[in-house]
Image: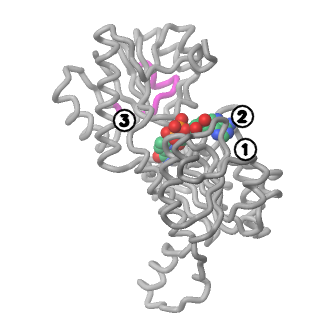
Amino acid sequence: MKVALFSTKPYDRKFFKQANQESPHELTFLEPRLTPLTAPLAKGYDAACLFVNDQADAETLEVLADSGVKVLALRCAGFNNVDLNAAERLGLTVVRVPAYSPHAVAEHTVGLMLTLNRQIHRGYNRVREGNFALDGLLGFDLHEKVVGIIGTGIIGAVVAKILSGFGCHLLAYDVRENPDCVELGVNYTSLDEIYAKSDVITLHCPLTPQTHHLINADAIAEMKPGVMLINTSRGGIVETPAVIDGLKTSRVGSLGIDVYEEEGDLFFEDLSNFVIRDDVFARLLTFPNVLVTGHQAFFTEEALQQIAGTTLGNLQDLADGRECPNEVSAAKLSGG
Ligand code: NAD
């Protein structure tokens, strides 16, 4: 297939070129993010390959379809940025990489917890400045603490396994129970109980209309004072101004995020020579107990190899007329 890859970085090129040695796809690496304005770049291509912040709304998909594109190959797991109904209407097949390295995201999640709790980010800076004082760096043992996991799919289950090694008590909420988590001793319960009892809450559900702003002012009001909140899933699950209010009153004790609702205008770019215009994001950066990483939880060698391999495999399935197990469609999601 002739494939136009949007939003590519040097690391995408490296891993896709390596994986493409064994398959005959013609790859064109484009730097721009997919928007209605950049979509015509895919004219004459069979497939457009997208990442998390590419815009695949109805308007953009119409331009892609008019340009002759037949396949949208997502090189990520989440597909909240794709209008699946519009894709179906326009005859675009959508494929994704449902699982690459759940360990990459789960390990980063636990890294955020440990860094925030033991204030390693602050300790690192202090020592480099010759400040060896410990005031303000007090943490807590994770051992015996209650961690609430919202969403126990592939990534949430790995987080549960790692945290069970720390001796945490694990509560979970999901629309369906994961037998691996039940076997591990995770207790499934209501969101209310998770909010009331958890010392740490970590989000691993997808962004859907049901989970949009799940963590809002009402949810935060139910949480244990001083709760640590971690989000490595999708920014839109958290209503950021409500969390900022929670941080200001200390109801939220600390916040670790790898994703942010408006990250499309910020993440994956070097903006160090520019002014940040997003006041909500800028406010987050002022808190000593907030740790932000720029959507890097997936970013390991193993994950990038699998992303490239699975994406090219998906395209090969479609090129050969085989059914692709990684296809997503509005009909499939609605059970149709
Ligand atoms: P998954 O589909 O295996 O698991 C998601 C789980 O959420 C499922 O068990 C599902 O039943 C549950 N769920 C669905 N709706 C829910 C609801 N309303 N309330 C509670 N639970 C609900 O997905 P995964 O591979 O574990 O990934 C989880 C999320 O992590 C993805 O949706 C993606 O947005 C995010 N992600 C982030 C990165 C990163 O780099 N930060 C990388 C990969 C994935």
Q: Nearer the viewer, residue 218 or 38?
A: 218
Which is in the foreground here, disc 3 or disc 1? 1
Residue 264 visible in rendering: no
Label 2 near ligand 1 (CB < 8 Å): yes
Q: Secondary structure at mark 2?
A: loop
Question: Element under label 3?
Answer: loop
Circles 2 and 1, Cβ within 8 Å, touching? The answer is yes
**For ligand 1, which image quadrant applies?**
top right
Would the CB of label 3 be found within 8 Å of ligand 1?
A: no
Q: Amino acid at mark 1?
A: Leu
| Res 29 → quadrant | top left
Amino acid type at mark 2: Gln
Q: Residues within 10 Å of mark 3 (few under 14, many from 20)?
A: few
Q: Main secondary structure of the magenta part?
A: loop
The residue where tag 3 is placed is 31
> Disc number at residue 210?
2
> Which region is colored magenta?
30-40
Q: Is residue 135 above or below residue 147?
A: below
Residue position marked by numbered label 1 in the rendering = 214
Magenta residue check for 75: no
Q: Earlier in the sequence, mark 3 or mark 1?
A: 3
